[in-house]
Amino acid sequence: MAMMAKNRRAHAGVYPGTFDPITNGHLDIIERAAEIFDRVIVSVTRNVGKGIPLFAEKERIGMIVDSIVSLKNVKVDSFEGLMVDHAVKHGAVAAIRGLRALSDFEFEFKMALMNRSLNENISTLFLMPHAKYTHVSSSMVREVASLGGSVIEYVPSHVNKALTKKYGNE
């Protein structure tokens, strides 16, 4: 792992996000990260900058927990404040970020540079999801589900059920 500092192994990585809701693209990133790191902490952020979430924090955590049952080295947590502080709390050496398309890169690059300036011991690892998920985002899933469209190929079945119930499309 060329991006890790000398004499450091990839013991733990933090994958922060709102996960409102978790998608198969997120799960693809989590599975890839679980192969790289000894421990992965999927960290639900309380990001008020994105507005009021559709699902409460406990609901999002529950959906993630139900999605990662088979991944023994992946845990779920939530946090408020700086991601780098949260990463240090968990002994993480990296933030895991997904890049779906070139349009994600500028924002993620700036965020990675800011995080590095806040704590140079936390690296950023960019992972790309499988090509079939590069157009999928939580906001797009919410919009399609809110209009009665099917999102079953983009989210786990339990998340699809939660979306159907939330929007009254049963």
Image: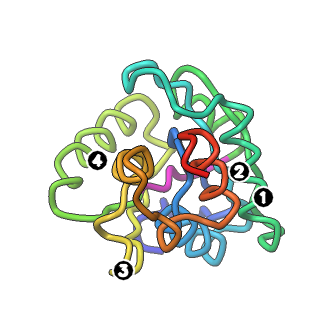
Q: Which of the two discs, 2 and 4, labels the residue nearer the N terminus?
A: 2
Q: Earlier in the sequence, mark 2 or mark 3?
A: 2
Dot 3 alpha-carbon crowd within 10 angstroms: few under 14, some 14 to 19, many 20 or more: few
Q: Secondary structure at mark 2?
A: helix
Circle 1 Cα neighbour tier, 10 Å, few/some/many (<14 / 14–19 / ≥20)? few
Q: Could you say where residue 145 lies in the image, as x and y percent from the top left?
A: 44, 51
Name the residue at 16% across, 62% down: 102
Is 114 rendered above or below residue 72? above
Kind of element beneath mark 3: helix
Task: Give the structural element (helix, strand or loop) at label 1.
Answer: helix
Q: What's under tag 1, amino acid-wise?
A: Asp
Please name which of the two marks, 2 or 4, marks the residue nearer to the observer: 2
Q: Are marks 2 and 1 in contact (CB under 8 Å)?
A: yes
Give the distance between the C-alpha atoms of the residues marked 2 and 1, in whole angstroms.
Answer: 5 Å
Instruction: For marks 4 and 1, give the one nearer the viewer.
Output: 1
What's the CA distance linking mark 4 and mark 1? 28 Å
Query: Residue 63 bears which disc, if any?
Result: 2
Which of the pair 25/112 is nearer the observer? Answer: 25
> How far across and down, in percent of the image, does residue 45 sit?
56, 32
Q: Which mark is residue 108?
A: 4
Q: Specify the segment rendered in magenta.
A: 92-97
Q: Amino acid at mark 3?
A: Lys
**Label 2 – label 3 distance at C-alpha:** 21 Å
Which is more N-terminal, label 4 or label 3?
4
User: Is 3 left or right of 71, judged from the image as shown?
Assistant: left
| Circle 4: element type | helix
